[in-house]
Amino acid sequence: MVVSMSSCRIFRLFLHPSSSTLYRKYRNTCIHHISTSSSLLQIMGDQVADKMENLTTSDKGQKKECPAKKEDGDGVPAAPSSSGGGGKAALKVPKGTRDYSPQQMAIRESVLATIIQCFKRHGAENIDTPVFELKDVLTGKYGEDSKLIYDLKDQGGEILSLRYDLTVPFARYLAMSKISSIKRYHIAKVYRRDNPAMTRGRFREFYQCDFDIAGAYDPMLPDAECIKMVEEILNALQIGEFQIKINHRQILDGVFELCGVPLEKFREICSSVDKLDKSPWEEVRNEMINEKGLSPEIADKIGKKIQVSGKPNDVIAQLKSDTDFMSNPTTKQGLESMELLFKYCQLMGVEESSVSFDLSLARGLDYYTGVIYEAVLISRGKGGAAVGVGSIAGGGRYDTLVGMFDPKKRNVPCVGVSIGVERVFSIIEQRSDKKIRTTETQVYVATAQKGLVEERVKILSTLWGSGIKAEHSYKASPKLLQQLQYCEEMQIPWAVVIGEGELEKGIVKLRNVATREEEEIPRTDLIPILKARLS
């Protein structure tokens, strides 16, 4: 991306502390430009960081020899130290993180409100857990992804790690609290030492929105509801065409059995299959052979079996006609479960076009034991062919995870889903082409003459006491034009204007900010009239 000089000048003027006039003039332009082009900030920030990492100057301005770049353990050059050496550190956020402007936060709040509304519609309760856990709680639950866990320094004898997801802490919570059934949602930040891709919504610190049903219930009823809820949420967010890929771990395990994969390699090979959504089959095949020690013959058999996907009824019919597939008890039982799942999905109103039965879906985490699913956004290629452009939700059944924490190894069957909200945020930000309201102020109290700050505050107090969201200028004698311009800029719907004449008559002027129409109303009737207009 090329950043124009004019954009850079506006950006610098916006930040310059001495340019108050220019600040006011370009404030809206800059905020809109920054919020709708977050990549501009990222690129400029990265350019500054790169300059600071490669050039260090002494206090006298003499150039110093550039030391070799250090790495922070993730294969990423570390930012220069802010202490010692007299050098200036780059002022930036850590890699894989970001700040959020008021406009971006308004989008996030709207998205999260939509998701929470759906969670509550399905009867979920809210919980929270610590942002860090004992390292032993997280170890061994994520397969190859365990290397992405952030470990913390020893604090008072406890070895801790930042949580990698919300599912494992939830299972620990169930075991500790001796809870055998609950329907819960949890929205919180998680942390992964992954290679960030900011423009694609992949961060090291990000939000997850989880919904889980814990308890021993009849097969596939909770699982189908999770899939239904994913469809509801993605439709409500209106982010484009999507498809929910569904598979069953029993089917994958049965296929591995049929193809001759040693039992101890099941999870390793499952992790390789999980990469098929990002890598072509040849790369995955080479990994199975060269890194996982599988024979080429077995790898080729797996490739033939798992590269099957399509409409649920079509795939079920195809698998039922496969003699080898139906002769294996594991695959047969998994297929029967999938038939029941799709039956319930249909009864719950899940659109057939929204789901596909995909044998290549693996979900690489070790704790899954049954149904697994993943929602991907769809882009239409040449000829209208559907092409997945990224996962936006995923989950599945994990019936043995709670038992790993229970002293008596008692299991609590669970199934759940996690919504990838960071990607949702990125998509909506990129599509936003209009100014977004960042406050919920309903009324602005303005004064037309000097010396009326006390009357202004009295009206404010009355509005606040009546539950009306209101604000005013913090200057004792602001200019009326500036107050009204602020109302228009912040999209505040109503303004209450008072002057000496209004005080004498016991009235106020009620101004419709959008139409600029004004009417005089008795001050005693202000609250009921405003509530009627705002309802």
Image: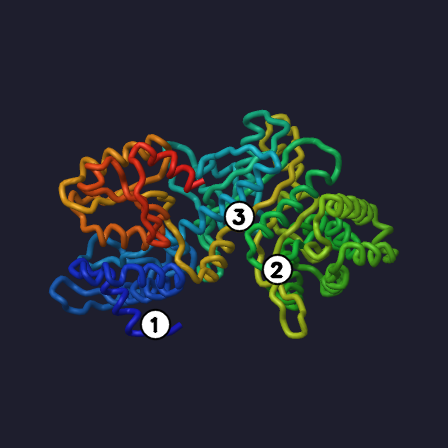
C-alpha distance separating marks 1 and 2: 32 Å
Classify mark 2: residues with Cα within 10 Å, few (<14), some (14-19) or many (20+). Answer: some
Residue 512 visible within the image: yes
Residue 167: image tag: none
Q: Residue at x 16, y 63 (%)?
A: 58
Residue type at the position of mark 1: Val
Tag 1–tag 2 contact (CB < 8 Å) = no
Q: Position of residue 316 (x, y in %)?
A: 81, 54
Q: Nearer the viewer, residue 249 or 428?
A: 428
The residue at which mark 1 appears reads as: 3
The answer to which of marks 2 and 3 sits earlier in the sequence is: 3
The residue at which mark 2 appears reads as: 241
In the picture, which quadrant includes the C terminus?
top left
The answer to which of marks 3 and 1 sits earlier in the sequence is: 1
Q: Position of residue 423 (x, y in %)?
A: 51, 55
Residue type at the position of mark 2: Glu
- Taking 509 as reference, is 342 left or right? right
Q: Position of residue 226 (x, y in %)?
A: 65, 43
- Taking 191 as reference, is 60 left or right? left
Residue type at the position of mark 3: Ser
Q: Nearer the viewer, residue 480 or 263?
A: 480
